[in-house]
Amino acid sequence: MSSGYKSWILLTGFILFYVAYLLLGALVFSTIERPVEDKLKSDIQVLKEEFLNQSCVNATSLENFLEKVLQANKYGISILPNSSASSNWDLASSLFFANTLVTTVGYGHTTPLSDTGKAFSIFYALLGVPFTMLVLTACVQRLMHPVTYGPIDMCRQRIGLDPLAATAVHFAILLLLVVLGFFVVPAVVFSHIEDTWSFLDAIYFCFITLCTIGLGDYVPGEKPGQKFRSLYKISVMVYLFLGLMMMYLVLRAFHRMADLHGLTSFFQLPHCDEDTEEDKEPIIEADPEDQHEAEASAKPLDPASQTSYNTINR
Amino acid sequence: MAAPDLVDPKSATHSSKPRRSFSAKSITLSPTEECQAIATVMKWKTVSAIFLLVVLYLVVGAAVFKALEQPHESAQRLAILTQKLDFLSTHSCVNHSQLEELVKQVVSAIRSGVNPAGTLTNHSSLWDLSSSFFFAGTVITTIGFGNISPHTEGGRIFCIIYALLGIPLFGFLLAGVGDQLGTIFGKATARVEKMFVQWDVSQTKIRVLSTVLFILFGCLLFVALPAAIFKHIEGWSALESLYFVVITLTTIGFGDFVAGGSEIEYLDYYKPVVWFWILVGLAYFAAVLSMIGDWLRVISKKTKEEVGEIRAHAAEWTANVSAEFKETRRRLSVEVYDKFQRAASIKSKMSSELGLNSDPELTPPKRKMSVNFTNELDREKEPVSPPVTNKNGSPFLNGKGVDPKRGDIAITPQVEVTTFNL
């Protein structure tokens, strides 16, 4: 009973800490952004007044016009002349949209306008999101062997480090490689292709995308007159998928490392309780796995032995 | 008889029912989820097959979206262009370039979150404390609506660092909430199961029933009810509210609809309640999504298993049946042989009693009998074999089932031995 009690206390502690973290973030964002916002507000007010002063337009008709323009802009339609060429829903863009839907990034630069589109998005997402998660975890599971277990073993055998140090060193190297390969290099590429983006903007974009936050303030390929737009969008999709896989991989490696170092048990978090020997089993042979599965499935369900729903399939 | 149990493949696959795991937020908890799953690593073939399937899914989705949305988009574009031309024609002192300049500025202001339409004096800031709190929440949960986003360099750098620390933190929180939800649900299911076990309902049905109940109840509490509330407060349509709920709780977060993002006067506690709903709803959705993922995984595994198992079962069944068959034949042949032996001994006794009436015709049948007997055994597919056994398993009851080739000796211990059909 005490462990249940303890878990409740830990949970409340987490919640409180989380709320405090949010408050801190709110304070900082507020202090940083507010002055800029005020300045922008006054600028736009001045602009409007200037426009009204020098023309015969009255305030209300301008307001109406602006409302409509903004409404259209919300859906990604701009009335500026050089942007009318490409559609937001040609095949490559729709593919990009479907990809942002399914990976839960969700930029929001284009959103479904029609009711049918919205209804379809709901079903598409409900099915596609777990599907994508399944694919990503399957790929990551496969990749763990060559990327994590292999090098760690090599470290241990060749250099002779003990397991804890080996995992820590390996994780540090992995993190460095991922940051270089999936943040810095793509940021350079993006800042080169997109005229209006600085290097910081590009890194910000990469980070916001790969964490699947997807604020949508920066979206690649939206510039009017973008050359090879379809190819560009598709390569961004590939980047997104690979990057997500790498993030999962890093997280998993981190989790294993934390496990080995005893951090997870300290915080009473779920363990990585799969054995490393099992993971090192040759993957090509199907028979040991199938045998194991057949054995497991042959045992009848015993209601009394199930302490938690999660253990049913063991 | 072991065969009937094995013929039914369902009994062997009943344990691969959908497994529900609550500690499964999409990003940070997939390691956790993974660890609680069976540690089976898929082959490259399977992974690439699933990958191709995902690509196909994306292409199909893209085609459908294109077909649905492009007409709307063209209509909107046309409408706004007509508006623009109307405006320019009614207000002749404005020229194209001026208007476009204004529009450009307005659009970039909108992107920064400032709404130039309407008077700006009583417009509340997008970065007051409660809205910043909400924004911080959207960053950490990775929903990322985008209706507000940082525009200063400092804001963006801070956003990156903030998210790096906050997303795992939120992941742990979600794990905790999900586990609590899971234990509550597990206890409820256990109680329901105890009730149903008395009525002798099968385990699988209970599990399926409880999963369905969980989904329905959760949908009601976390999806339908909030959607109704949003419809009422925000003034959206029913579909739009549902769309917002799903897009938010799967952390996609487009931002075209945001609760608390429009110009309405909200109650003070509205936004915190929305945030709390997001937290619990995310845990619920993570559970549902992981359940769907488990089903997809189980389906692919199950088909593989079932194909393999069906083959194995078929082989075992045929082996068993043929073994049984051989056993029965062996038993029967032993019985028949015994009976013939007895008949032969009785006959010899009788012939000795009757004196030296050694009927030469009697002996050949005996020999013929033995010869035919061995032939009988070899010819298992003879139509003779079924008549050999009748219901009681005793051969030649009432003298029926006689083989003319064998020299028709009907032998029953009960019938008078004097009746010999020759």
Image (tube, coloured by chain):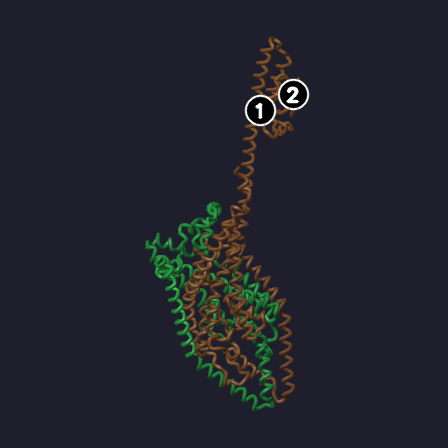
- Residue on which disc 1 sits: B336
Figure disc tally: 2
Please state which amino acid type lies under the numbered disc 1: Val
Q: Residues within 10 Å of mark 2 (few under 14, many from 20)?
A: some
Against B405, residue B244 (above or below) is below
- The disc numbered 1 marks a residue on which chain? B
Against B229, residue A6 (above or below) is above
Drawn side of residue B340 relative to residue B290, left or right = right
Please state which amino acid type lies under the numbered disc 2: Asp
Q: Secondary structure at mark 2?
A: loop
Q: Position of residue A153 (x, y in %)?
A: 38, 53
Q: Residues within 10 Å of mark 1 (few under 14, many from 20)?
A: some
- Residue on which disc 2 sits: B408
The residues bearing labels 2 and 1 have C-alpha atoms spaced at a distance of: 14 Å
What colour denotes chain A? Answer: green
Against B20, residue A46 (above or below) is below
What colour denotes chain B? Answer: brown
Against A281, residue B319 (above or below) is above
- The disc numbered 2 marks a residue on which chain? B
